[in-house]
Amino acid sequence: MQREPMIFTAAGVIFGFVLGYMVANARQTGTPGTPRPPAAAEAAAPPAAPKAPPSLDPSEVRALASLAEKERTNVRVRVELGYLLMEHDQHAEAVRWYGEALALDPRLDDVRVDMGACLVRLRRHEEALAAFDATLKNDPQHKKARFNKGVALMASGKRKEAVAVWDALLRQHPDDPDLQPLKEEIERVRAGGSQS
């Protein structure tokens, strides 16, 4: 009885951290998943609280969807539409557009990771894990894929596996300030018991 609420509490905390991390990285670059080093002024400024995106403009979605219909091989418009929908919690539709982009260009690992994050939100954990594993096969050092794989494992109740994935990530990036809260989460998971 106690185990299930603990898993969902930990998964909720981690997922909130993940979404904040993904949105921060995506907003910095304008392209999902591609971090940008901070400028000197940005590095000196205290971190601002993440702002909620403005409400979804249906006319913007219609315009992008119309463009995607006209330009059947336009990968970029599909990625932009997926990102816009993901940012506004329209995860099922985001998965659709990300899937179309990947069908046109399967090398887009960052897009695959964003699609996997949407699949986690939809509780389609096995599909999410497959997306993260495909990215890690292409790029074993892919930080967001490894991080999100841990989230998917945690959300599906595989706590030990999630911690193992995150431990490996922290060994790869020991000084990454974005990952420091993960150490605390790992300790909370370990303190909660040894269930898998």
Image (cartoon, rainbow, N blue to C red):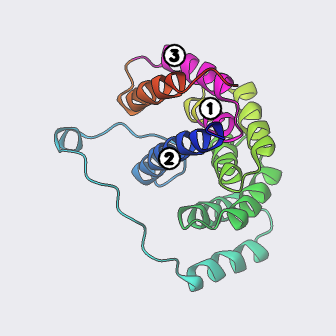
Q: Quadrant of the C terminus?
A: top right
Q: CA distance from mark 3 to mark 2?
A: 19 Å
Which stretch is magenta?
A: 148-174
Q: Position of residue 90 (x, y in %)?
A: 63, 68
Three-letter amino acid code of the residue under disc 2? Met
Three-letter amino acid code of the residue under disc 1? Gly
Judge whether 140 appears above or below 66 on screen: above
Task: Tell me which residue sits at (70%, 76%) in the image.
Answer: 65
Question: Which tag, 3 or 2, sits closer to the chain's start?
Answer: 2
State the residue in front, 113 or 188. 188
Q: Quadrant of the N terminus?
A: top right
State left or right for residue 140 relative to residue 175.
right
- Residue 151 falls within the magenta-colored stretch: yes
Circle 3: element type: helix
Judge whether 92 appears above or below 194 on screen: below
Local crowd at mark 2 within 10 Å, few (<14), some, or many (≥20)? many
State left or right for residue 103 relative to residue 119.
right
Question: Which tag, 1 or 2, sits closer to the chain's start?
Answer: 2
Three-letter amino acid code of the residue under disc 3? Gln
Label 2 belongs to which residue?
A: 22
Label 3 belongs to which residue?
A: 172
Q: Position of residue 159 (x, y in %)?
A: 64, 28
Local crowd at mark 3 within 10 Å, few (<14), some, or many (≥20)? few
Label 1 belongs to which residue?
A: 150
Residue found at the far front of this picture: 1
Q: CA distance from mark 1 to mark 3?
A: 14 Å
Task: Tell me which residue sits at (58%, 65%) in the image.
Answer: 89
State the residue in front, 109 or 87. 87
Q: Position of residue 183 (x, y in %)?
A: 43, 24
Question: Which tag, 1 or 3, sits closer to the chain's start?
Answer: 1
Q: CA distance from mark 1 to mark 2?
A: 14 Å
Q: Position of residue 46 (x, y in %)?
A: 19, 44
